Image (spheres, helix red, strand yellow):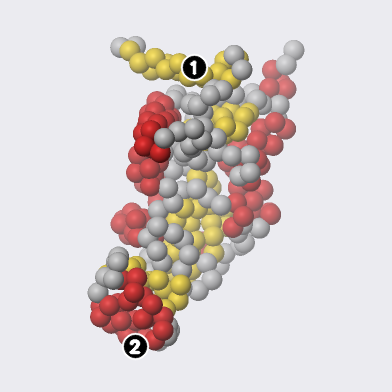
Amino acid sequence: MHLLLGHSWDSCCAGVLARLEARGLPARIVPAPLTPPARLVWRLDAAGLASRLSWDEQEAELASVLVRGTGWLDPAGWDPADHAYMQAEMLAATLAWLTGLPCPVVNRPSAALWYRGRASLMTWRMLLRRCGLPVPEQLVTNDPAKARTFGHHLAALGVAGAVYTPLTGEAGYLVATDAGWQGLIAVQARTPVCLSEPHGAPRPACIIGGQIVWDCDPPLEVRALEPRLRQLAADAGLDFLEVAVAPVRRGLAVVRVDALPVLEHFAPPAQSRILDALTALLVPATAPHAALDAP
């Protein structure tokens, strides 16, 4: 059984499922593998780890797992405090279980990624710099004067305004007018803000194993970043990673990193290549097709 840990409305899960089924391979999309109707038996002893997972009284021997989500315990009928506790227990058990699986697990998560969800570019900044990947100039501050000085600094370099990006979200807002800076002051009264230099149109790419799929054929200066992008995925411990590269005032920079790639960021031809490469990670070339094993 090839387990896709995610949702049926996720086009990535749906696309991989269709490819596995076309090869005659058993596959299943499951939002939360450790909640009913699933049944887990996980034995830990001196001999090592052994686990069995079953649905509808039928045991499933896992051939591979694609991690596209953390799972969510339905809060209906739960006291909020009890639900929060049980959700935390389920997440911890699922993380530990995934860590110990002997089969291929695409995007076997670290604890940091498992609990952090979609992290901001600021979170990836140290790893990006370690891999030699350029990043936009940024400032985090709750001091309105320092924020405005940052804006003046960019203006002196010929850059119009600064981009405010929440540390917990992906949307960016250009701050370039007096009204915009005044609005930012109101936010800074409650929390520090992250400001970045503006960038041009982003060019997304997916790293799948050692393969890189761009949304469209990039110029040579963009392709020159590919070895460092592979290093980024390797250092992050991820088989499947999305990045976006865009021009800034000093050249090219990585402006987005996402451990949960979004297929809709890519045109259909690139989507197809991504799904093919992802399926190949789950089913190594040496693995026999179910149809070939049939008597």
Query: Which three-letter amino acid code belongs to the residue tagged 2?
Result: Ala
Decide if residue 290 is on the left or right side of residue 178. Answer: right
Residue highlighted by disc 1: 52
Q: Position of residue 54 (x, y in %)?
A: 55, 18
Q: Is residue 212 visible?
A: no
Query: Which three-letter amino acid code belongs to the residue tagged 1?
Result: Arg
Asked which quadrant contains residue 124, the reply is: bottom left
Q: Position of residue 9 (x, y in %)?
A: 63, 44
Decide if residue 127 is on the left or right side of residue 233. Answer: left
**Residue placed at 47% from the left, 42% from the top?**
239
Residue highlighted by disc 2: 156
Decide if residue 37 is on the left or right side of residue 111. Answer: right
Q: Position of residue 269 (x, y in %)?
A: 68, 54
Placement of 217 over or under 35, stated as above or below? below
User: Number of labelled discs?
Assistant: 2
**Disc 2 from disc 1: Cα separation:** 63 Å
Q: Is residue 266 visible?
A: yes
Q: Mark 2 or 1, which is nearer the eye?
A: 1
Could you tell me which quadrant the C terminus lies in?
Answer: top right
Placement of 199 over or under 131, stated as above or below? below
- Residue situated in front as seen by the camera: 286 or 289: 289
Q: Position of residue 290 (x, y in %)?
A: 68, 22
